Each structure stands twice: as structure tokens, then as C-alpha cells.
Image: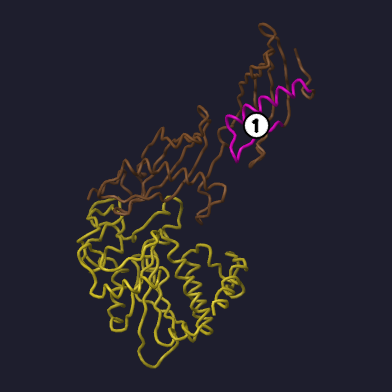
Chain colours: A brown, B yellow
Amino acid sequence: MELVPIHFPARRAAKVALHHLNTLHGSPFNVFGLQEVHKATMEEIDSGRRKYSLDLSVIEWASSNSVFRCLALVTFSLDLKTPPDVQIDCAELQQTMLSLQKDEDQGNMSEEMKPFWHLAAVASSFIMLKESSENTEFNMAQVASLNQQESREKKLMLKYHILLHDFVSQEILHWQLLCSWAPGQGVEILEAQFVPKCPHTNESADNTAAD
Amino acid sequence: MAFSVISLVLLSAAVAHDRLADGLEQKSYNYTTYHTMDEISDWMNQMERENPDVVSRMIYGQTYEKRNITLLKIGLKSTTAKKAVWMDCGIHAREWIAPAFCLHFVKEILGSYKTDPNMNTLFKNLDFYITPVLNMDGYIYSWQNSSTRLWRKSRSPCHENSTCSGTDLNRNFYANWGMVGISRDCCSEVYNGATALSEPEAQAVTDILGALQNQILCYLTIHSYGQLILLPYGHPNISAPNYEELVRTQACLM
């Protein structure tokens, strides 16, 4: 059954889809709101459940004002204890999730990014602990980039590119890592990968100054 | 006394720095942003021009890529030889805050020597020899693009067949050369050079300090990072003969 996109039945279902989207991808810097429903249909499935199929535009209004086109399926059940079920898919959403780029070489960082910098420092500790010996002395030198991934099991998933510095060899070491954090659950490293130096201009591909 | 220094700092921060405009005289220099080597050289000329009674530029050597290593000699002119305080910044190319500090330091002392009695006494009794960027080749290279930003060493080539280059100027001095904290691998960030003083930059510093050796009161070299004041010598088992005095001075500095 075709719905009028600007009338309330479609709009209510669309807003539920937005709530779900915010639980997955929301952050202090990414909050999603409804911009427009383009097309909506509704069908009754099994015993009185109603499934809404929506084509909508979503706007991220906390930082970027980017607009995304999404398709959503929202299923309401009759019994009020059961929350609606939502599936939503938005084009190009991955690119705009929380990201901190090394866009400013002056070393400045905004106040609201500091917690993520702190998280990076904690995550780095896992790596620095593992890599340390009596011949090394590590510090985290820089958070080169940060990209938020889709939350998993209610934990924030953060993909970092971090620069570590070893005081002894004076080498800067690049690490990519995926870590999770949730209040009360601490920081966990899910993936960590050392990024070797690029084999171009004056740098040897794997710089093993083993002294 | 403190008020006049602070008000000068606020004044220079309030005026925007326009990199594209000609004539630095019209604009106030921005001491809270990083500057290219050309801008720093222009600034050095400007400091000499604007403060001819206390500032003079001196070229004391050449880098590997044949640039003139320049310092500012700052102090009230005297007929007799004066004691000297040496400060070099930017031995390590990527440590941009060090040259920025040198510039800031010069600005501070030039802004206070007329009104601050202590600074005035310093200017009367000694000369500051300040090199804003010692490793000019490396500094310029680190400005090229994001893949060169972390360059540390000089820009001289390796002597053996290697795709790497550069010597750590701060491991190239003739002082317990090659004994500790170095690598003999030219690809290493702490490669100490083919021999001691193989690098013209290190040689230039050695030569001028040699010429000034009876006048030098204090040698300062500025780096980043660490929030550390390091005392000689850079060897775990050897301390400088005046170690106790240095420790007391260090306590004052902190």
C-alpha cells in the first residue's frame, strides 16, 4: 500500500528508522535527523504486524550537515512491549563518521576531540607494552587519523592511525589499530597492524637498524 | 617589568600575519605559527635592520646543500670582548617548535632589554649567539610534503650504496663520537656520519665555538620533545666536571 510521504504514518516510521541509525552511528559529532521521506509503502505481514518500506533523506546535523539517501524497513508489532524492528542502509555513510584528520600541522586540537586523543593514548599503551624492551623507550607522538566504525555490541569502535616514537632509535613507527570502548568496559584492541615505511626516496622498505 | 613583556606579547599576537604581503615592516610577525626557512631568513634580516645597535647577523658556515648558516649576535656593543651565550635551534629538522622558540626568545629579549634592568645587564655584559635553524637543508626538506615532515637528519648522501641519506647532526660532534646512542647504519635516524664532523653543519658549529671558547659561558641546544633539561655528557658513565653547578642552574631554570 502506497503512503503519502508527507503524511504522518510515513513520517512516524521514518523517525523510528532515524532513532535506530543514531544508536548505530551516533556520537558527539554525528547526530542524524529526518530531512525528507521520498517514498513510502506499508504492508501487513503475518498476524497484524506492519512493515513500512521507506526511501528517505537523512541529515547529519551535529557537524557536517551532510545529507544521505537511505532505504529503511521498519516493522511494528502489535504488542507494545516489543520494540520496532529496523533495517536501514544509507549510501556513503561510512565516509562521514567521526573522523579526525591530520589537517592541521600546527599541533592544535579542539577540546571536544581530547577524549578521543586520550583513548588513543590508552590504546597505544597496549602496543607499546608489547613492543618494549630494554633498548626502547616509547611515547605516543601523534594521532594521525581517527575514523569511527559502526558500533558493535554497544561498544564504540574506533579505527586509529597512530605514530609512536622510540626515543632510543628516534624512529617514528606507524600503527593502524581498531579498538573498542564502552563505559565500564574499558579499552580493548581488536586489531593492530604495524605499517612499514614506504619504499621510496631515501627510505629503505623495512628500516631495521638493529643495534 | 613583567607587564611590559606581556603587553608586547599580546600586541604581536593581535596583528594578523599575512604571508603573501610584501614588506614585513608593515605587519607584525606571528610568533605562534610555524614559518618557512625563507620567512625566518627574512625575519632575521628584519631583526638586524630594526635593532642595529644590538643585533648583527653572522654567517659561520655552509650546509651540505650550500646554504649560509646564519646566527644573530645580540647584545649591547662593547669595545672589549664579551662573554657569550650560545643557543642553536633546529639541529633536528622535524622539531619545528625549536626554531619557533628561538624566534620567540629573540623577540622577548629584544622587547625587554631597554626596560628590564636584569635583561639590560645581560645585554651589557654578554652577547647571545642565536642560530634559529642550524639544519637548514633538513628543515626545508621537512616542509616539502607530508611524507617528508618527519625528517630528522641532514641531507647529505650515504657513503655506501644505499637508498637512504642523512646524518644525525647531533651524533656527529667530536665528543665521545660513536660511543653511545648511535647507529652505524646510514638508514638509521641516529646515524652518526662516516666520521666525526663529517657534516659541514657540525663542523661549522665546532669552528665558531672553538673561536669563542674563552668567551662561552653557556651552550644551549633546543630540541623537542620531552620537557627535559639534559646535562652533559651524553654518556652514562661520564659527567661534566662542573656537573654540580649545572644541576643548581638547572634547578633555577625549572
Q: Looking at the rendering, which quadrant does residue B254 occupy?
A: bottom left
Q: Looking at the rendering, which quadrant does residue B181 occupy?
A: bottom left
Q: Chain of mark 1?
A: A
Asked whether A114 or B127 is in front, the reply is A114
Residue B159 % position (x, y):
24, 57
Q: Is residue A88 above or below residue B124?
A: above
Q: Check residue A30 for magenta coloring.
A: yes
Residue A169 % position (x, y):
29, 53
Q: Is residue A185 above or below residue A52?
A: below
Asked whether B208 or B120 is in front, the reply is B120
Identify the residue at horizontal 74%, vertical 24% (top origin).
A11
Q: Is residue B127 above or below residue B182?
A: below
Q: Main secondary structure of the magenta part?
A: helix
Identify the residue at horizontal 65%, vertical 31% (top origin).
A68
* Residue with the most extreme bottom position: B79
Name the residue type under label 1.
Phe
**Which range is magenta?**
A8-34
Q: Is residue A61 above or below residue B42?
A: above
From the viewer's perspective, is A53 left or right of A93?
right
From the viewer's perspective, is A138 left or right of A96?
left
Q: Which residue is mark 1?
A: A68
Identify the residue at horizontal 70%, vertical 24% (top origin).
A14
Task: Count numbered badges in the picture.
Answer: 1
